[in-house]
Image: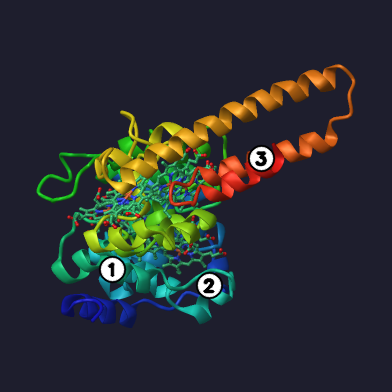
Amino acid sequence: MGVGGTGSLLMLGFLAVVAWPTPAAAQAPPEGCVACHLEIGDDRLVTPAKEFQEDIHAGKGFGCTACHGGDPKAAGMEAMDPAKGYIGKPGRQQVVQVCGRCHSDARFMRQYNPALRVDQVAEYRTSGHGRRLLEAGDTKVATCTSCHRAHTIRPPSDPRSSVHPLMVAETCGACHGDAKYMKGYPVPTDQLEKYRRSVHWKMLSVKGDLSAPTCNDCHGNHGAAPPGVSWVGNVCGQCHTVMAVSFAKSRHAKVFAQMGSPGCATCHENHEVTEAGDEMLGLGAAAVCTRCHSPEDRGGKTAAAMREQIDTLRAEYDKAHTILQKAEHAGMEVSQAQFELNEAKNALVKARGPWRNCSSVERVWRSRW
Ligand code: HEC
Ligand code: HEC
Ligand code: HEC
Ligand code: HEC
Ligand code: HEC
Ligand code: HEC
Ligand code: HEC
Ligand code: HEC
Ligand code: HEC
């Protein structure tokens, strides 16, 4: 089931009176709507007309009537005649139909941009947001214009867009980080705050690495729902493929699934993912292993042994590295030794995944020194 009964009726009524926009119509002369709205002297009415000038839809030749209906040629108040298809200010449910009228129509959209997806409404309907709005009538959840601001819509690649990677966290956080707004819902409101402390946000905002995830990379753009326990590993695994593959083979993957523990996030958190370091491993104060293992059980003993091995390996590596540097400064040929040392370093890096079998490190280590 998609839109509820009232929604479908609204949709039919709307389609009956609004002429289908065409690229040709888009070249029409300036609308009466804008001329009058710019002059009204009431911010609520002027701002949309002003802002819209830099909206992508204006750029593609559309005017106010594309979403609001009405008569673009009339200069007086009769422009806003419901008999001319004028719908006024769309309600939050109605917005979905207003946008979907074009964005769900592959044939229409292809004329402008064949590469653009046309499944936003379909996806949105399956999301926690969409289901609540369209089926339960909860108007506090996000609708299209909560994430894309009605008169300043821009492609995600535009740094000024509310859905540019650097802006998404703020856009979602406007609701999810606002405890007052979210009062009455059972979900926490700390996602933005925690995310802002994560290594992912640091990579994105400080290093400008747009491959690091923000809210929609883990939750989807239009199918926003919490990744259930069963696919948290898949969410992280989109990018951390090597880790995901080795984790899937581990004993932990099986027992965590049985325990209902959220895969990667069990040890790394979901929103506040921080840099991983050796301190996470073993039985020390900052180690994640102690949450479930004690020094007596097999997991705990292994955790301590792995940590010790990595510490030893690291100390040996540092020593070898220093010796090599001295040798190089003294003018010796060290490229082969350097190559081998690099391999040892790779092994060290690999060994840091706690589900890994330490014997692979040991093997490389013994073969070198
Ligand atoms: C002659 C001036 C004038 C013209 C032309 C005009 N408007 Fe308006 N518009 C107004 C005024 C005044 C209001 C506020 C009065 C009201 O709320 O009914 C308004 C209100 C609106 C609202 C807000 C309605 C609400 O429920 O809050 C929308 C949307 C709107 N106009 C869109 C349009 C569109 C689209 C066109 C062109 C088809 C248009 N206007 C043409 C003067 C105009
Ligand atoms: C891409 C669709 C779209 C276009 C094009 C568009 N609007 Fe809107 N407009 C909306 C939606 C949706 C709302 C309802 C508020 C919201 O969802 O944020 C709205 C709200 C408004 C309001 C009420 C604002 C308020 O705060 O109460 C006015 C006035 C308005 N639009 C005027 C215009 C004018 C004038 C134009 C042309 C310059 C225009 N709109 C073009 C989608 C659009
Ligand atoms: C009259 C048809 C029409 C309506 C109604 C409409 N759009 Fe669009 N929209 C377009 C077209 C055409 C483009 C340009 C696509 C392109 O060239 O990339 C576009 C572009 C966009 C883009 C940028 C896509 C990109 O990456 O290039 C977004 C985001 C968007 N629209 C969202 C909305 C939202 C949200 C609404 C409702 C408030 C809406 N649109 C209403 C036709 C429409
Ligand atoms: C207009 C406010 C608003 C905005 C903007 C918003 N959300 Fe929501 N969101 C809500 C509300 C309200 C709920 C309902 C809370 C609940 O399910 O208990 C919700 C629910 C969710 C849920 C849980 C869904 C479920 O099925 O339980 C997730 C995940 C989510 N939002 C992610 C996001 C992401 C990611 C963004 C930005 C891309 C975003 N939201 C933007 C208001 C918003
Ligand atoms: C919870 C926030 C949220 C809601 C609600 C939302 N969008 Fe989006 N939308 C996004 C984000 C984030 C992107 C950027 C994706 C990216 O970076 O490629 C996006 C991208 C788009 C695009 C560009 C093409 C694409 O699919 O990537 C269009 C068009 C679009 N949205 C239309 C809509 C329409 C229509 C609705 C209502 C049915 C809607 N959006 C509801 C967050 C949202
Ligand atoms: C690195 C991936 C990732 C990023 C980035 C991310 N989330 Fe989440 N989010 C998750 C996971 C995993 C869960 C937990 C799902 C579970 O336990 O079933 C979750 C849960 C949620 C929930 C449900 C309530 C809760 O806290 O458990 C909301 C709401 C939410 N995220 C919103 C957001 C918002 C808003 C942002 C951006 C500020 C964001 N998320 C960024 C992965 C992510
Ligand atoms: C959209 C891609 C993407 C997704 C999804 C993603 N990450 Fe990341 N992650 C990155 C990038 C990029 C970095 C920074 C570069 C690096 O260290 O690889 C990073 C860094 C990390 C780090 C720090 C690595 C270090 O060297 O200290 C950890 C730990 C991490 N992510 C865990 C997770 C977890 C857990 C999830 C799921 C909840 C997740 N990531 C989801 C891309 C992603
Ligand atoms: C049982 C706890 C645990 C689970 C589950 C877990 N990790 Fe880790 N992860 C760690 C520890 C501990 C380290 C740090 C090891 C070290 O630095 O010695 C680490 C390191 C990392 C690193 C940094 C590796 C590097 O080479 O710098 C990334 C990225 C990472 N994990 C991602 C993931 C992903 C993705 C998943 C799920 C597929 C996952 N982890 C599941 C405990 C865990
Ligand atoms: C969320 C709880 C949890 C966390 C955190 C956790 N483990 Fe485990 N681990 C388990 C469970 C449950 C088993 C299965 C025990 C069994 O088979 O009886 C297990 C099994 C193991 C085993 C296999 C032991 C055997 O009996 O063969 C090793 C090794 C292990 N864990 C190491 C670690 C290390 C290292 C860490 C920290 C990086 C860690 N674990 C973090 C719950 C956890």
Query: Residue placed farthest to the left in the image?
Result: 184
165 or 20: nearer the viewer = 165
Question: Which residue is under mark 3?
Answer: 344
Q: Which mark is residue 152?
A: none
Q: Determine whether label 1 and label 2 are within 8 Å by CB.
A: no
**Looking at the picture, which amino acid does disc 2 mark?**
Ala
- Badge 2 density bin: few <14, some 14–19, many ≥20, Cα 10 Å: few
* SS under mark 1: loop
Cα distance between the residues tagged 3 and 1: 76 Å
Question: Is 182 displayed left or right of 362 in the figure?
Answer: left
**Looking at the picture, which amino acid does disc 1 mark?**
Asp
Mark 1 sits near ligand 1, with its Cβ under 8 Å away: no
**Looking at the picture, which amino acid does disc 3 mark?**
Ala
Residue 122 seen by the camera: yes
Q: Position of residue 130 (x, y in %)?
A: 26, 66
Question: Is 273 displayed left or right of 111 in the figure?
Answer: left
- Badge 1 density bin: few <14, some 14–19, many ≥20, Cα 10 Å: some
Q: Determine whether label 3 and label 1 are within 8 Å by CB.
A: no
Question: Which residue is under mark 1?
Answer: 81
Q: Position of residue 309 (x, y in %)?
A: 50, 36
Mark 3 sits near ligand 8, with its Cβ under 8 Å away: no
* SS under mark 3: helix
Quarter of the N terminus within the rendering: bottom left
Q: Position of residue 329 (x, y in %)?
A: 84, 17
Mark 3 or mark 1, whichever is nearer to me:
3
Q: Please state the total of marks drawn on the protein image.
A: 3
